[in-house]
Image: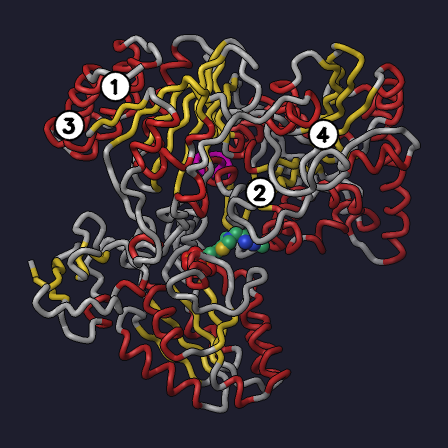
Amino acid sequence: MKRLLIGNEAIARGAYEAGASVATAYPGTPSTEIVSHLARYEDIYAEWAPNEKVALEVGIGASIGGARTLVAMKHVGINVAADPLYTVAYTGVNGGLVIVSADDPGMHSSQNEQDNRGYGKFAKLPVIEPSDSQEAKDYTALAFELSEQFDTPVMLRVTTRLSHSQTLVEEGERGELVLKEYKKNAPKYVMLPGYARGRHVEVEKRMAALSDYAETTPLNRIEWGDKKLGIITSGVAYQYVREALPDVSVLKLGLVNPLPKNLITSFAQQVERLVVVEELEPVIEQQLKAWGIAAEGKEIFTLLGEYSPEMIAQRLAGEALPPVSGLTSQIPPRPPLLCPGCPHRGVFHVLRKRRVTVMGDIGCYTLGALSPLEAMDACVCMGASIGMAMGMEKARGEEFASKMVGVIGDSTFVHSGITPLIDIVYNQGTSTILILDNDTTAMTGHQDHPATGVTIKKSPTNKLDLEALVRAVGIKNVRVVDPLKLDELDTVLGEELARREPSVIIAKRPCALIDRTPITSTLWVDEELCNGCKACIRIGCTGIYFKDNEKKAAINPNTCVSCGMCPQVCKVDAIKVVEG
Amino acid sequence: MSQIMNVLITGVGGQGTLLTSRIIAQVAVDLGHDVKVTEVHGMAQRGGSVVSEVRYGEKVYSPTIPKGEADVLLAFEKLEAARWLDYLKPDGIVIINDERVDPLPVMSGKMKYPEDIIDSITQFRPKTTVANATQTAIECGNVKAANVVLVGILSKVIGLPPEKVEEAIRKLVPPKALEVNLAAFRRGVEWSVNQ
Ligand SMILES: Cc1ncc(C[n+]2csc(CCOP(=O)(O)OP(=O)(O)O)c2C)c(N)n1
């Protein structure tokens, strides 16, 4: 009986059926569900690592130790793990090692849309790309085989559309759990220059062997149709091509690095016109052109965002796009919002009021950059806030730094905020850093992390003490405040900004979506008192709205969680709290 | 392009569109169809607009519905019907839950909620039905069953056998909410739809 599985669950299933016993990850959309599904299998060790570099390093250790191991991350996570990645390509593996890179064309929830097939090429790793959930499962299992056969880590590259689409999958049995023998082998695993030179030879031999394998592997296949048009494609783009152009000839690549030169050449010779359809970068197209094979690609198709069947039909079959209603332009956008009761709202309200410069970071709190709070100046990558604050201060001086903060979430701080904080102390910065400790990794769906004291399997563990950690790196001024106590937060912020020393303010309150404290009060607006000034509306909460006709604010009882923030911003005390 | 049923389900994060798409997809699987469902997680969950695309038939390739090919657009909220209208076939069917959720630009008074949105939709796509699923769900005993009222309406429109849908509801809804949801589904099936 086939089941509908999202691509990510299918990958987890594939690893399970292939006998994997170790799985590591740091969460990141669209990759998160892979390892959260693997954690449900009792006989698989799974962990949320503090960041992707650690996830991969634990994975490398497990692989050298002989276990079949899966490591998963979102595309930008591979940047964090790039250092071990490039060198594990040299050491190779013992137990099969599969590294999943979940890319995000269209940036549904990412800060860039880098194409990680490029990593495969530059790190010299085989890259496998499935096009639906069944392939995701099958290719994952095959990736473990190839990893051991060719003594290499294998990158499984997927995209949001694959990770989060459900398609039918035929499930199999748990594969045999094999722990391969571990033998000390320094020339293979100790990457000193003298040994690494030897390994580089192996890497090149392996790539040559993989190129031969690419010619015959079932991962690459030709579906012959009308030979007037031949398409080379991979991943979900293959599905769009089949949908849009059912009659053409298609060379579907499941192994996208290295590419099969002979297979492609012979396909190219047999079709009248050759087009490469690949989302994002022209990775396949450029290789074809380097080989002197004439093909069209990015002159027809964009480098930006996701593709669609209608886009392909329009560009290659000349089909007109359907008529549009013209309504779209009148429709107000519906951007994502901080939830009612979100502790981050208090922080950004106070920061906006003080008009400070905010070096931001990545998480739910990045929404503080959007209307109506609009209290963030920069956000680049996880952990960058603290280093950017330091750089801003060194560029513009201490006076400027007394009106500037860095803002970072708890999960992000543990991920990559500790080393830049050490930099501030070491190089005598004076910045004030706010750690927004909501006791979870909220953005990606509430994963635990080292400072929550709970593992991926939901068992209790040591709870990293952020306050003690911050003191240990040399921060003397550490304050802990409730971010929804606005006056207190504002006072503490004022004091720490004024100090010509680095400070950390831990804004501590659980995410409203995980907070189990029962709601014991309700709010209402006294319309006699409300003067329609909209101060409460400017906190951007769906629990409160403005009645245009009456020019009064009103509480939405369906969404309000009585966090008590709006009564604090009302200048005329019109928002009343009723206990019970 | 191909003989498949394309159902687009739209709404606001937190409205329960996910359960609806899961029920429809499960029925399609039980009927032996090839099925694909796609939805985007992540940022959209934080009260943003959400969309689920369900496609089934003999063989489904693309997980996304090509623009202009949706057979049915089921919207949990009025604005979200208008936002996705261009995905509908010219003779496609629109089912709109009579619910208004103001997005931030409206809440803060920067933009107006288009009052005549249903009229504009009906002008462009006449096979439009507005249903007060929330009220019906309350009558059935739980406002949260509104999404299953909509499953009832939708399943009749696309011709899914009611006993199969009830089977799927039994699989996907927790036992203690089952009776209310089955009642909500049956009320949905009784709606007369403009088609
Ligand atoms: C290198 C990298 N890994 C993962 C992500 C995905 N991601 C974005 S924010 C975030 C963590 C958010 O947690 P936290 O800092 O605690 O803030 P919260 O969302 O809880 O407010 C993650 C995992 C990313 N953008 N970059």
Which residue is tagged 3? B136
Which residue sits at x=56%, y=36%? A21
Q: What's under tag 2, amino acid-wise?
A: Gly
Where on the picture, by quarter, is residue A80?
Answer: bottom right
Q: Is residue B192 above or below residue A24?
A: above
Q: Is residue B181 above or below residue A8?
A: above
Q: Which residues are magenta?
A: A38-44
Q: What's under tag 1, amino acid-wise?
A: Gly
Disc nearer the start of the sequence (2/4) = 2
Which numbered circle lies on residue A277?
Answer: 4
Toward the viewer: A141 or B121? B121
Which residue is tagged 1? B152
Which residue sits at x=47%, y=17%? B35
Which residue is tagged 2? A106
Toward the viewer: A141 or A562? A562
The answer for how far apart the CA atoms under marks 3 and 1 are is 12 Å
- Quadrant containing the C terminus of chain A is bottom left
